[in-house]
Amino acid sequence: MNANDANRFDVATYKKLNLDLAQLGMSDEQLKEHFLQHGHTEKRVFASTSSTCEYLSMRWLRGEGIEIGAGSSPTPLFGDATAIYADIEGGNRIFGATDVSIRYSIDTPVPAELEGRFDFAVISHVLEHSDVMLVALTHLMELLKPGGIGYVVVPDKRHLVDKEWMDDFPIQHHIDEFRSPGIYDAEHDRVALSALVKHPELSNPSGDHQVFENEANSLSEQEFEHPDFRTLLAGNSKDNPYRFAIHKHTYGPEGWIRVFADAQEFLNFEFDIIEARYGAERADCHFILQKRDRSAQPTKLVRLTLGISYYRNPQLVENIEAVLPVLQACEMIESIVLINDSPDDLLLAQRLEKLNGAPKVHLITNPENLGYTKAINQAYRHAKKLGTHLVCINSDVKFSLAVLEEVVAVSRLDNQIGFVFPRADSDPLFGMTGVLSTQPVLRKQLLPRYQFTPTAVGYFLFVSDVVLDRFEGFDEVFSPGYEEENDFVLRAGAVGFRAALANHTLVQHATSSSFSEKAELLKEKHHRMLLNRHPYFSRIVQDYEKSEEQSVYRILNQVHHANDLVVDCFGFPPVLNGTTIYARDLICALNRCNERDSRVITVLVRKDVYELMQLHHLTRLRFCHDPVTLTPHFNLLRVAQPFEPEILCRALEKSLCSVNIFFDTIAQDIPSLRSPRTEAVWYDLTNVYRNVVFISDASRRTFRTRYPVRGAGLHVIHPSLDVSDYGPVMPKMPPAADARVLVVGNKFPHKDIAHTMDLIAGPAATNSLKFDVLTDSPLEVSDKVAVYRSGALAQSEITRLYSSCQFVLYPSYYEGFGLPLMEALHFGRPVVARYAPLYQELKDLLGPIAENVHFYRTSAELAALLAHPPEWKEATPTSPMNWDAVARQILSVVDNSVAAFDFSQRCEAKTVVSNRTYPVAPPPPRRPDEEAPPAPSPAEVLMMRIEGLRSRFPFGFRVARFIYRKFLK
């Protein structure tokens, strides 16, 4: 055990990230002992860290490893992990590498002494420099032992100057480079250097192109063409270390996921992508790859027969021809039975005859058309005779060996699984569309590996050898086809065999191309036959369709991009208050950030609030004014804490990953606002929002002590701390000699406006100050007090009040953030505020300008401050945390919420929220200037009491009603 690891051990983090241990009820001492004994061997994260690199290293890196191109920032290691460092010749001079013990580049063949030696290999910010990415990944796998871990870190192009000139290369570009090394080298070099020459402002002095800054800036276009300079990066200058400073290929997060998935398939699935994370701290993408242990593949113990029936359409033979060499080389495949069920089709017969006699291929040509059911039963009997499992495959299905391997692997996960089938691109019940159909990594990350289903599909169906032995095949009463697979699954289900859907697989299926145009009539006839035999079939399918699992999955199928985001501001009142101002400034910042990120961001907001916020100029965002018409997005960001169950339901129905920006708990701390309904909604909040962003640490601490966290991520992201964000740009003028004091606060009692004004401007007041009060509370106007109605005041008038006052008085007892405090500092006016932990937190974050914030705790301290009003002390704002930085941090939380997505937890949240009966909403609080509602009449009082008794004693009322109807009526 590493002593440093023991010192960093954090029991709270260990509980949060290892829920299986937390659920055992172990004490803190037992958890620490578990970590010391088993933490590293079980690959458990044990310390709190904001570094994605540290987190993944704790999680995955063990034993002896190698890091290539570590530069001056090697990956931190924990436990027993050790590493040797390799770099190119001259790497220590160019990239600052230290302690390089091996001269090696990932582009060059792996030396024999390094092949298969390491438990892990790390390439961080190296792959994008590689000449041939697929070769580099091949070499990475060759360095590893079977089951070893490859840790790859690559940059996010959205935050690089590369986006100005570099294309998103498709996988075919990498395949071309793999097959013809050097084919694009000169082009990569020319484009990169030409861009730096033409646009020297794009050079990033602290980035990867620093090496070329002097060379590029010192050359004209003519000098760039000089052979000596071109030789510096010539495609054949493999020994020149400067070549590795150029990015050859970079992508955004979605592009990298797509490239790794395509590379995985092209390299015959030599590795699995077992984790992918976004590192917001350095704007990079992290991938954990595990080399497959071919020697320990359980599928080698399995024997398969593939059965494919052909009727017409000779072109469909191409589907099996495309994968036949791979299938023939696979040890688990015993036989491939091809059935020609249209012997009069000469072209089909010719194409199938060419395959006859090939290894493992067994061709059956029927003397006449038997129909699909009878034809596939021939393969059924063949597999039963051989004692193998059977996979029935429609001729119009495109599949790969990886699909077969995963289907077989799923079949071994539960003893009762008798049938397994993949998802398809066209199936109405088990189809896969949207983002999951194009990103295999997301499928593995978001979906459970398999799920039980009430039935299965016939176009690609794995049937276990045990089922083959028990039954005689598909019932030929359903010939030529349709419903035979449903009947078979239900008959087998009667004795305990279950059908499983392999969620991580996808095949392409051309619907109904194998049948004639009479297919619809055939479907109806066979469906009636099926229901006569199994009358419960419709019910179990309907139950499956109505399940929460299917509800979540339908949302997944409607989402087309993993970084789509809906910003939920629906329900805001058309009033400019702290909530709407925060939302407006954040939305504007998201619009600015989206100019680089190019993600689809939709803002859900009422039309009148949209116009009040003046959001019409934000062209990078989309707007929706009706929740009903809002299409599902992958992510949802709710601005402000929810008060109604409908907001929770909207997050569950319109998104997969939800984040809430939680302001404060004031609504439950003030008796007149307190509501059991709100309490119940907040109790369920972390069921729905798996990441909660608090605008202050004080709010986060309060929430944690009152409401269950349930493993959700709790983050603190303050609103902008740049005071220049809180008003128009204007010169700061000193206050006039007769300047008034601006007092800010609304009608709610915790703002303490009425009491404070009576104290400082009432008959007993001793100061000579005059006051402007910005409030919606009814106050008496006098010579000393002028009242301005907040929420309805023009921005120009608010600006005048702040810029002309002597100082700002903020008497509130309790706030979520304290917007008037920031507005006062923007206009160069001191602030006098009642002390609260939140204000102290804010003052500590603001730097030197915070000297203009003054606190009081008692009335006497306030009187003393008014007797000697504070003066403005000039200070330069130092906080870099403006609204753009806030938006980027929130987007980072949104992006990382994908990694924390739990399909089962999401289903459970939908069940909890949909089944809970929330308390009835209380009537809105009456304004102090409103008349009380009329008292109910005696008849209304009597009816309310009867209704109360009926709800308390329903059985007694039913008995009384029965007696009345039976004997008295």
Image: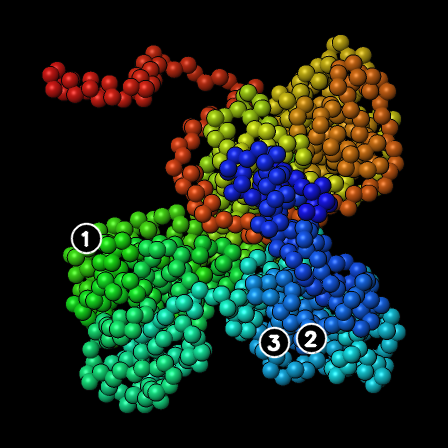
Determine which residue is flagged by label 3: 174
Q: Is residue 269 left or right of residue 620?
A: left
* Distance between the alpha carbons at the discs numbered 3 and 2: 24 Å
- Element under label 1? loop
Determine which residue is flagged by label 1: 535
Work out whether residue 12 can be spotted. Answer: yes
In the image, 946 versus 389, the foreground residue is 389
- The relative height of residue 449 versus residue 730 in the rendered view (above or below) is below
Q: Residues within 10 Å of mark 2 (few under 14, many from 20)?
A: few
Determine which residue is flagged by label 2: 111
Residue type (three-letter) at the residue carrying disc 1: Pro
Disc 3 versus disc 2: nearer the observer:
2
Q: Pick out the residue farthest to the top.
A: 764
Q: Quadrant of the C terminus?
A: top left
User: Dividing the picture into quarters, in which one does residue 780 lie?
Assistant: top right
Q: Earlier in the sequence, mark 3 or mark 2?
A: 2
Q: How many numbered discs, if any?
A: 3
